[in-house]
Amino acid sequence: MSILVRSDISVLVQGITGKEGHFHAQKMISYGTRIVAGVTPGKGGDWVMDGKIPVFDSVKTAIEATGAEASVIFVPADHAADAIYEAVEAQLRYVFCVTEGIPMQDMMRIKRYMQTSETQLIGPNSPGLLSPGKIKLGIIPGEVAKPGNIGVISRSGTLTYEIVNELSKAGAGISTCIGIGGDPILGTGYPELLELFEADPETEKILIIGEIGGRFEENAVRYISQHNTKPVYAYIVGKSAPEGRRMGHAGAIIEKRAGSAAYKNELIKNAGIRLASSIEEIPALLLKS
Amino acid sequence: MSILVRSDISVLVQGITGKEGHFHAQKMISYGTRIVAGVTPGKGGDWVMDGKIPVFDSVKTAIEATGAEASVIFVPADHAADAIYEAVEAQLRYVFCVTEGIPMQDMMRIKRYMQTSETQLIGPNSPGLLSPGKIKLGIIPGEVAKPGNIGVISRSGTLTYEIVNELSKAGAGISTCIGIGGDPILGTGYPELLELFEADPETEKILIIGEIGGRFEENAVRYISQHNTKPVYAYIVGKSAPEGRRMGHAGAIIEKRAGSAAYKNELIKNAGIRLASSIEEIPALLLKS
Amino acid sequence: MRIQEYQSKRIFSHYGIPIPKGRVAINAIIADHIYEELKPDVVIKAQVLTSGRGKAGGIRLAKSAEQVEQITNDILGLTIKGMPVKKILVEEAVKIDQEYFIAIITDKDAGMPALMASKYGGMDIEDAVRENSSAIYTLPIDPLAGLLEFQVRSAALAVELPKQLWNDFADIVLALWKLYEENDADSVEINPLVISEGDKLIALDAKVNIDDNAIYRHPELTEYFDLEEEDRMEYQAKKYGLSYVKLDGDIGCMVNGAGLAMATLDLLSDQGGKPANFLDIGGGANSEKVSSGLKILMQDERVKVILINIFGGITRCDEVAKGLLSVFNNTTIELPVVIRLAGTNAVEGLEMLKNSGLIVVENIGEAARISVQLSTGSKK
Amino acid sequence: MRIQEYQSKRIFSHYGIPIPKGRVAINAIIADHIYEELKPDVVIKAQVLTSGRGKAGGIRLAKSAEQVEQITNDILGLTIKGMPVKKILVEEAVKIDQEYFIAIITDKDAGMPALMASKYGGMDIEDAVRENSSAIYTLPIDPLAGLLEFQVRSAALAVELPKQLWNDFADIVLALWKLYEENDADSVEINPLVISEGDKLIALDAKVNIDDNAIYRHPELTEYFDLEEEDRMEYQAKKYGLSYVKLDGDIGCMVNGAGLAMATLDLLSDQGGKPANFLDIGGGANSEKVSSGLKILMQDERVKVILINIFGGITRCDEVAKGLLSVFNNTTIELPVVIRLAGTNAVEGLEMLKNSGLIVVENIGEAARISVQLSTGSKK
């Protein structure tokens, strides 16, 4: 089983008729994910994927017809906040938001709105989740990873694929790989996932791929020190980034000392977590210990 | 003991330097209520009541200095919503809002905001609570009631004093009398108080003094049918009121059939609750059975 | 506070909600001017704050200058549910393909706003709902998060609105929410919202009702407060901060507290009497408020008896007596005045009034019985 | 997006926040005109999007036309933290009794806005905070309920603001919240907010920073987008939807994905190389984006080597190759180009590029090492 979701969970795709949504829905289906519905307002009644997947006008009607429990959101940024609200209000259990660029004030309102909700939001700006051989939710290329015992939590997309791919080449496999997202305000942080990996019988080692900006990794270190017994490895990207410039991701900007790679690396080392100081070191670090 | 609050609970008065706030704080103190502080922004550092009660600029500083657990609000309508927010945010246990005329949208936002709060709000537009001989919070004149075994829940002010006074003259006393308020959107409805009276060893009979407008009494009847074993009596005022006109209280307006006295009386009778069809019948009804 | 259709439409227009072209008129000459701008076809609509205008003949189509003059005069001669028509709205006639009902209301019982929508818009919405309660789609709105786009879409879906109009519909309904929220409305309603000429959504009617308690923070709305519609006595009472409702009987009542006032009216009705009004002088009323209230009752030509019922609490009975005396000392009382004082300083108050010729009674029931007898003349 | 002081003050003024009288100038002639309106004393302030203007001599007092001319020319000759001063703001000199710091920021870690206030306003706020973290009062704001009046009062209490100014302070801070919320600001700051002449509160400085992700819904703010301040290459990249940050080295980099791009820069630095830029072509980039990115790198005169690192996922390597070829086929490449393609369709991509003279490497580490060698000339 994957962490977080069952491998056979029914999934709907919000924004399935868009270019990205359609492409990745296809990839998820090919990987074996049970995509049962798409949602695009105004396109209800259409069928996509060679007439195999029905499209609905609303998340609610899609759930009523198909029993979907999770959603992957590919809706463009100017309507993505609304798509999250709709998913939350329809009481989906898991929502993976791939969309990048949702205004911060929208995200803050959503987080406050979700305070009394049972829905778990991953992202936004998350590449999703991949449990090799079991399930793929989002955009992580299935080819890069093979099954194994390493759990990966990351704030990046391609960087994660690169690392997971190198691990594969070195003979190491992945239990579940999950991206929490590159935005500054996220639905789910490291601690909740660290807890799941700790409890996951298929995971023996945990790798954190962090970035500059924010206190996400600080929270992770605090959690790990108190709760994790499995070995944790970490790599923080962005040590050469200048202060005050946004390095692509809205969340990857050093605003305070606490956001710098140097500060994060220091915390990680002090907590006794195994640190890769360069991307090239990662496979050896995880394999040797 | 009173229902809801302990007799020796520490109370602060928001708006204590205003005419009404000052007058009624004095009355509460005379009745034996432990008023420990007043709050009026900008008047912090003053002392009122012959230098016995300190005034603070904020609820938070008042609580820190005096340990107050409850508040009575006399702040004018244009600042009363803010006073409630302040009391809720400071985590007071009980807030009695006497102020009338708070805009409805403010009250809706407050109720939503309080969804995750532990604070209990009574009112707005509530005359407060009186447990004869024990405690008085708000503006119910202490002289009208003597101690006894009747619990009273009402939406009105003077009408309640009138009825309680007639009960006193007829020899019947009161355990606790509480006004939920004459506004359409209230912090606390009948059911929560019916539950407390049911559990209160000093209360043997419960009297509901209802009004036209809203579904408050409908909710009460539903609750009583399911949960109350003590005898309940009811009187609904406004049977001669025309439809669509607001009879003083913002909440006393018949907008739908469900808001009319005839409809409410029918529900009450059908539920087997003893109904007084006229104010004059009340004392006899409560004393004979 | 309800706002006339033509004024509500001005607000709609400010929020970008499409309305028909048109203007308000108070006579046939102005109506004809407007007709010349909008011809060939116009709709003439009575401006009164009541429902059922259509069925009462207050909304009619005119296809020529002659018809405009005739219909304007007809409608300006109408009295609808007791309200004389003083203004009309002359609007371009809009072709109607389909009618919807849309409203945002304050659901007091839920303590939340609600969005309501129906495909049975128009004059018969009430019948449609009576026959089938699912004829209206209702959706609660989170008062902090506000109306969300997907909720508007769910309403569009529920009323089976053609999909090519969803975006325009969303613009209108989100504007309606903004209007509701920014103006502290109690309710806002479009009935009907119509599809015209295949692809245009237009609000043919507009109802805006502002929360009385919030008017103080919308001074710009007071221009919409229609004094002509208001009863003279109600207006006067409002000025003095009194809560007054005109009723159709002959016993003038003054009471402190809304609940006690209603109880007094109920008792009068039980005895076969007819109250002329509801008048609550409020808690802690001073002598000026009392004398203002009394003067309003005395001005009312319908009143045969005045009943004053005060249960002193915050209100002091001696203060009430002072207010009454300030009137009695300057005016000859021709009407019988029944008074009942109880509670705080009642003894002092009664002592002050003992030579003023009032009929003093001890309790509320007695006060009602005597007032009714005096008003019906059945007994002296 | 940061907005210049003079523009931020225009927004302040729109929200009713009091600011000094003043206008912007680009030379001494205009400055003198403004001085004639505001004399006898004015303050001349460099308009650059950086902190530390005061300490760099970018804010000075002028007491005569001669001083205005001299100081204007001085300041327009400054370069502050790498930014040449092109505009100045000439304002009336305001008497300062007391300085405060007020800001509303987006606390990304808490996922909530926060109100910050300090009585140590002015140039030295950062020192004050470094010495004593309690020098700033911070209060989280509920993003749904918004900033509440009592919270503003608690800030006034915390900074020991004189009580007679509480109402004016509340007006200013609530306006600042409205500005923050309505314009999707990331942060808004007044430093200092001063008490002047005993009882006036005035915002002497104004900083407004808009959330880049939300600019699309504030077209009215794009007029504030200062092209002169923007680097030419950054501006060009933005136009093509690329994410570009100028750095101070000589290795031009193009990568897909922000994380992978940072990792590439880190590797270059580890090897002693100096990246000229961060350039993320994003996920699923098409060939046009790739060629636009490449052109930007080739225009950069500082660049000695170009490094292209693509891990195909959504992005297809053959599409990347197509984009590169469209440039190579039309331009002679004078610079060495190191390329590493992996993932989706990498084989096809490399096949397409095999005759284009690129230096093809297999992995990211190798790509970095060779690029650094080429840039430093330490090895061929």
Image: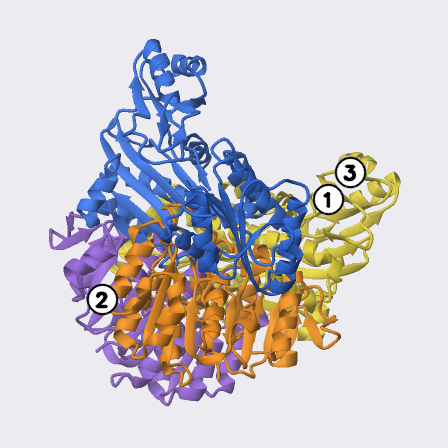
Chain colours: A orange, B purple, C yellow, D blue
Judge whether B179 appears above or below D334 on screen. below
Q: Do labels 2 and 1 share a chain?
A: no
Camera-side residue: D237 or C157? D237
Q: In this view, does B29 lie to the left or right of A176?
A: left
Judge whether D84 appears above or below B209 on screen. above
Quadrant where the N terminus of chain B is found in the figure: bottom left
**Mark 2, residue position:** B69
Q: In this view, does C42 lie to the left or right of C215?
A: right
Residue at the (28%, 65%) spot, across then down: A268
Disc assigned to residue C31: 3
Camera-side residue: C135 or B156? C135
**Mark 1, residue position:** C89
Q: Distance between the residues labelled 3 and 1?
A: 8 Å
Q: List x then y, in percent, for residue D47.
A: 40, 29
Inspect the image, locate mark 2, and give the three-letter code of the amino acid beneath it: Glu
Report the mark closest to the observer, 2 or 3.
2
Quadrant where the C terminus of chain B is found in the figure: bottom left
Q: How crowded is mark 3: few (under 14 residues within 10 Å), some or many (20 or more)?
A: many
SS type, badge 3? helix
Camera-side residue: D355 or A193? D355
Q: Are marks 2 and 3 on the same chain?
A: no
Q: Which sits earlier in the primary sequence, circle 3 or circle 1? A: 3
Q: Are marks 2 and 3 in contact (CB under 8 Å)?
A: no
Q: Mark 1 lies on which chain?
A: C
